[in-house]
Amino acid sequence: MSRSPGAAVGGQAVIEGVMMRSPTGWAVAVRRPDGIIEAEGYDLPRLSSRSKLAKIPFLRGITVLIESLSLGFKALSWSAQKSGEEEEELKRWQVWLTMVVGVVFALGLLVIIPVMSANWLKQFFDDSSIAFVILDGVLRIAVLVGYIALIARSDDIQRVFQYHGAEHKTIHAYEAGDRLTIEEIQKFSPRHPRCGTSFLVIVGLVAFFVFLVLAPLALVWQVVARIVLIPVVAGAAYEVLKAGATSKWLSWANRPGIWLQSITTNEPTDDQVEVAIVSLLTALTEEEANDLIALGGIPDDALNAESTRVEPSNG
């Protein structure tokens, strides 16, 4: 029996592991160099779990974006340390610095470069203001796809993409109400309509229509608008992504993202699926996890994982 939309979970691939987010908590699991799966689970921050903003359409997309960036960088830091990529876990200020640098890099890659390039190319077109917006949108998608295709040449990134596939397959099985066995999970597609990759593509599509209205503005205001309106575009894109996962007439919006996932997801090994299972079980409540375990079929490596639930600090 499939689970209700309220039971939807999400996540991301990390270094040698998977981060999962449930409606009540989040967790990250990795396979250490000694072969043992280790996981840590946390309650969701107040911003997304108890804030009124998290229930208001459009505004909830902004809270999810902020939360995803924060949790994503924390999960990457923890996974790098546990997988042996780093000797010690990053301090909080180092995580925030890394996040800021990452956001600045993304703005430069997906905002500044396309805008400046489109501004130069528009001189070759008659209706330069409309051409500018069209060129900017096309270049933004081209830069995104090109960057993903470039990093995909790395063997390490290919392993991350395998864990990305493991994350999606495990979520598919969970949301379908299936047992979390290797056989059941591996039957599903490594692509998922609510993936962050799809979100980025939808952001590009929404941004095109928003900035089309602002086409007559001068270049400097075009750049400012693209940065200032990021929350607006992200909020609208989140609603399209959420609706597209369940609505047939909006499902077309997810198709470009599904296509792009042919680059960002790979078929996972059974060992990688085991890590995704542990991450999901740790992200769920104890009752939900026990119900899934009671169904049977969960691999021994997942059952024997070193999982810890970190209690929230009073401060």
Image (cartoon, grey):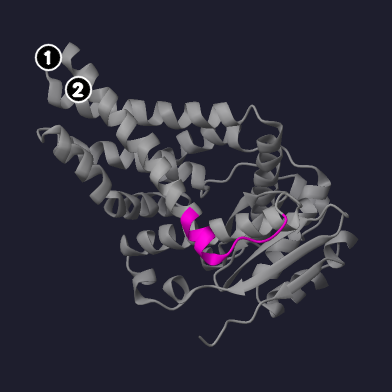
Looking at the image, do the residues carrying marks 1 and 2 touch, with CB atoms under 8 Å apart?
Answer: yes
Q: Residue at x 20, y 44 (%)?
A: 224
Read off the magenta span.
87-97
Image location of residue 217, percent across then percent down: 10, 36
Location of residue 108 in the rendering, given as x and y in whole percent from the top left corner: 36, 37
The crowd level at tag 2 (other Cα within 10 Å; few <14, some 14-19, many 20+) is many
- Could you say which is closer to the camera, residue 280 or residue 99? 99
| Residue position marked by numbered label 1 in the rendering | 126
Q: Which residue is mark 2?
A: 131
Relative depth, front residue between 34 and 4: 34
Q: Which mark is residue 270?
A: none
Residue at the image point whose x is 33% and y is 55% from the top:
235
**Image check: 173 left or right of 93?**
right
At mark 2, the secondary structure is helix
In the image shown, does 180 or 237 lie closer to the viewer?
237
Tell me: 234 left or right of 33.
left
Quarter placement of the N terminus: bottom right
The spot of residue 188 in percent (x, y) is 70, 45
Q: Residue, x 42% and y 72% (percent of image)?
A: 47
Residue 189 visible (yes or no): no
Q: What SS does tag 1 mark?
A: loop
Q: Quadrant of residue 266?
A: top right
The three-letter amino acid code for the residue at tag 1 is: Asp
